[in-house]
Image (tube, rainbow, N blue to C red):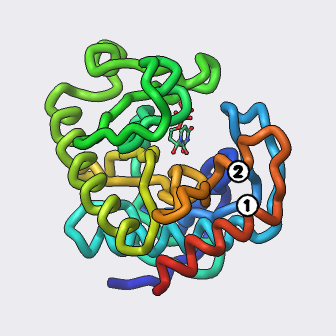
Amino acid sequence: MNYNIIKKNILLEGKTKIIYKTNNSFKIIIHHKDDLTALNGLKKSCLLDKGVLTNEISTLIFKFLNYSGIKTHFIKKINNREQLCHKVNIIPLEFVIRNIVTGSLSKRLGIKEKKKIPNGIIELFYKDDKLGDPLINESHAIFLEIISHEELIYIFSIVKNINNLLKLYFFNKGIILVDFKIEFGRNKNNEILLSDEISPDTCRLWDRNTMKKLDKDLFRMEFPKKEKIFDSYMEILKRLNK
Ligand code: UDP
């Protein structure tokens, strides 16, 4: 494959990433920023070199998923903050997969924290900042005309596959994959590809022995300690590199 890619102007800028156009209309460059956001952007901060860590961690995870046969947008890491990816039109849905009860699920269903969910629960959120990304179901998504019934069935089967692969991948590194969020997009041929990122910014990751949090939940806390967040992301990277 020819990788003579030239970075062009910004296509769009999100809370934690910048997407650049390239000289190839089917490829983009994703740049990881140091910004940390939570509570739908209400809580914001900056953590020096966090973008380097999320770029590296997401690269390792997408490489593993590509290798495992999952179709993703990821092509290659090009520098410490950037990846070359296939351009997709993001489907405005967040797929949240939960393996252990915590956070809002515990409150919503009245179930004690830390209960295992043997086959995982998949939730759908409609990506719309103005609406605050509401929790929706399959019928809502189809009614909104953002996805077809067939595509949803296809994505659900991939999501289960990804969850099984990642649960084991992290477990072998001494980490419990508590829950995580993924997004999909359609490429030029209308194929559905896993897109966006997978990192401690988008997953709840607990140490397998101590159950210590190693992810962005440390930032969601009332008095977040930046060094602790950075050290935890570093710890994740160290273990994934083992
Ligand atoms: N998540 C994410 N981005 C979002 C929303 C959720 O990456 O915009 C991830 C989050 O890191 C966690 C999971 O999805 O791993 C569930 O997060 P949620 O905000 O739904 O938390 P909860 O409802 O459990 O408090």
Please state, as top left, top right, bottom left or bottom right, where the N terminus lies in the image.
bottom left
User: Is the residue marked by circle 2 packed among few (<14), some (14-19), or many (20+) residues within 10 Å?
Assistant: some
Number of numbered discs visible in the structure rendering: 2
As measured in the structure, the alpha-carbon distance from the residue carrying label 1 to the one carrying label 2 is 6 Å
Residue 97 seen in the figure = no
Q: Which label belongs to residue 218?
A: 2
Label 1 CB sits under 8 Å from any ligand 1 atom? no
Q: Residue at x 22, y 27 (%)?
A: 148
User: Is the residue marked by circle 1 packed among few (<14), some (14-19), or many (20+) residues within 10 Å?
Assistant: many
Ligand 1 in which quarter:
top right
Q: Residue at x 16, y 34 (%)?
A: 153
239 up-or-down from 31: above or below: below
Q: Secondary structure at mark 1?
A: helix
Q: Which label belongs to residue 16?
A: none
The three-letter code of the residue at mark 1 reads Ile
Say which of 173 and 200 sits in front: 173
139 up-or-down from 127: above or below: above
Circle nearer the N terminus (1, 2):
2
* Coordinates of residue 98 in the picture (x, y in percent): 39, 40
Q: Is residue 139 left or right of residue 87?
A: left
* Coordinates of residue 20 in the picture (x, y in percent): 60, 60
Q: Residue at x 46, y 40 (%)?
A: 114
Q: Is residue 173 left or right of residue 117?
A: right
The three-letter code of the residue at mark 2 reads Leu
Q: Are dots 1 and 2 in contact, CB under 8 Å?
A: yes
* Coordinates of residue 165 in the picture (x, y in percent): 27, 62
Q: Which label belongs to residue 229?
A: 1
Q: Identify the image quadrant of residue 51.
A: bottom right
Say which of 18 and 22 sits in front: 18
* Coordinates of residue 144 in the picture (x, y in percent): 36, 16
Q: Residue at x 62, y 26 (%)?
A: 129
Residue 209 seen in the figure = yes
